[in-house]
Image: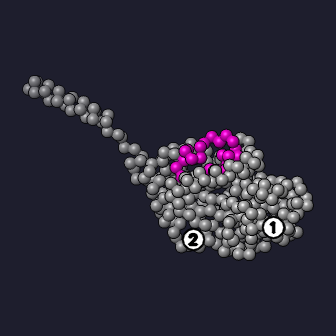
Amino acid sequence: MHRRFLLTTGRAHLCAAALAWLAAFVPAPSQAQTAWPSRPIRFVVPFAPSGGGDVIARLVVPRLSDALRQPIIIENKPGASGLIGAEAVARSAPDGYTLLLSNNASISTGPLVQGSATYQPLTDFEHVMMISSFANGFLVNAQHPARTFEEFLAMVRARPGRMTFASAAVGSAGHLTGEMIKQRAQLDMVHVPYKGTGPAIADLMAGQIDALFDGLPASTPYVRSGKLRLLAISSQQRLANHPGTPTMDEIVPGVSGFAWFGISAPAGTPRDIVERLQLEGRKVLALPELQARFAELGMVLSGRGQAEYTEFIADDIRRWTPVVKAAGVRLQGL
C-alpha cells in the first residue's frame, strides 16, 4: 500500500513536470487572439472642433462605430499643426484601440515644417485607409473690395507686404498653397497662422485679416449664407457645387493643393485589425447618405487601402518638400 502510494505520487509529479514543460512553449492568450474590438476605441482628431477634419470625423466615426459594434470616442487633440495628436497616437499601444485621423498637416507637411518631429510619418504608423480629400477655398469677407481673385492679387501687388492671408495652422494645406501662390506669382503677402479654422473664420468675418485659405467643408456654409466670398479654389478642376468659382491654376498656372484625411494606427497594429478597419471603412464610405453629404460639402471620397494610402503619403511628402524649403517655413517645437 505504501509503495503503491509512492508510485502514484511519483507519476503525478512527472505529469505535472511534463505539463509545466509544455506550457513554456504554448503562448498565453493575447489580446490579438480576443475578438477585436471588445471595448471602446479612441479616435484622435489632431485639430480643434469645427474644422474640416473634425467635420469628416463626425460624419464617419458614428457609422464606423455602428459597423464595429463598439463605441468610438472622438478626442480632439489640437496643436502644432496636428503633430501633438499624431505623436500621441504614434506612442500608443498597437492594439487597435487608438486610431488617428491622419492628414497632410500631421503626416506629410507637418514634420517637414517642424524639422524635428518625434515620429517618422511613414514608419511609425500603419496607414489603414484614405477617407477623402477636399480643396481649399480662397476666402474674403463679404464686404471686401476685391470681387475676384485677380482683383485681390492686383491689390497685393499694389500694397506689397501689407496684405494678409490666414490659414488654420503653420504647415496646413492652406498655408502651403498660399506659399506656392506667393512663389509662382512673385507676391509679397503676409501669412497669419491660427490654431484652428474657427478662430480664423471669426477674424475674417470681423475684418481682422484680408483673406483666408480654408477647407471647403468648414467654409462652405459661410459662403452660402453670404458672410464670406469665395474667390478661387485650389483643386485642379472646377467643382460641381461651386461651378462659377475659378481654380487658382486658371489664374496662377501650376498652383493647386488640397487637404486629405484618412485613418491611421500605431505601427505594429495586427494585420487582421487593419484589414477589418479597411473592410468596414469602405462599407461606410459606400453609404448613399454619406456620399451625398460629402458631395454637398465638396469632398471627394477615396477608400484607398493601406498600400495605396502609404504610397500617396510618400508622394505628398515629395511634392511639398521643395515648397517648404523655398518658403523657409519652420514650426519651432511642439
Does the magenta portion include 117?
yes
* CA distance for labels 1 and 2: 30 Å
Q: Quadrant of the C terminus?
A: top right
As rendered, which of 17 and 89 lies closer to the eye?
Answer: 89
> Sequence order check: which comes first, mark 1 or mark 2?
1
The part of the image, by quadrant, that contains residue 247 is bottom right
Q: What's the image's color scheme? A: one colour
Task: Identify which residue is drawn at 45% across, 48% down.
Answer: 270
User: Outermost residue toward the left?
Assistant: 1
Q: Which residue is mark 2?
A: 291
Task: Identify which residue is drawn at 67% across, 58% down.
Answer: 49
* Amino acid marked by disc 2: Gln
The stretch of residues the image draws in magenta is: 106-127
- Name the spot of residue 7 as percent of width and height, x first: 13, 27
Q: Which mark is residue 98?
A: none
- Name the spot of residue 92 as percent of width and height, x first: 54, 44
Q: Is residue 271 left or right of residue 53?
A: left
Q: Which residue is mark 1?
A: 149
- Name the spot of residue 202 as percent of width and height, x first: 79, 61
Q: Is residue 267 left or right of residue 188?
A: left
Asked if one can make out residue 139 in the rendered structure from this viewpoint, the answer is yes
Does the magenta portion include 171?
no
As rendered, which of 276 and 231 lies closer to the eye?
Answer: 231
Q: Crowding near pointer 2: few (<14 within 10 Å), some, many (20+)?
A: some
- Name the spot of residue 256 as percent of width and height, x first: 70, 61
* Amino acid marked by disc 1: Phe
Q: Is residue 9 left or right of residue 126?
A: left
Task: Assign a secondary structure to mark 2.
Answer: helix
Q: Quadrant of the N terminus?
A: top left
User: Outermost residue toward the front?
Assistant: 253
- Mark 1 and mark 2 residues within 8 Å of each other at the beta carbon: no
Asked if one can make out residue 219 in the rendered structure from this viewpoint, the answer is no
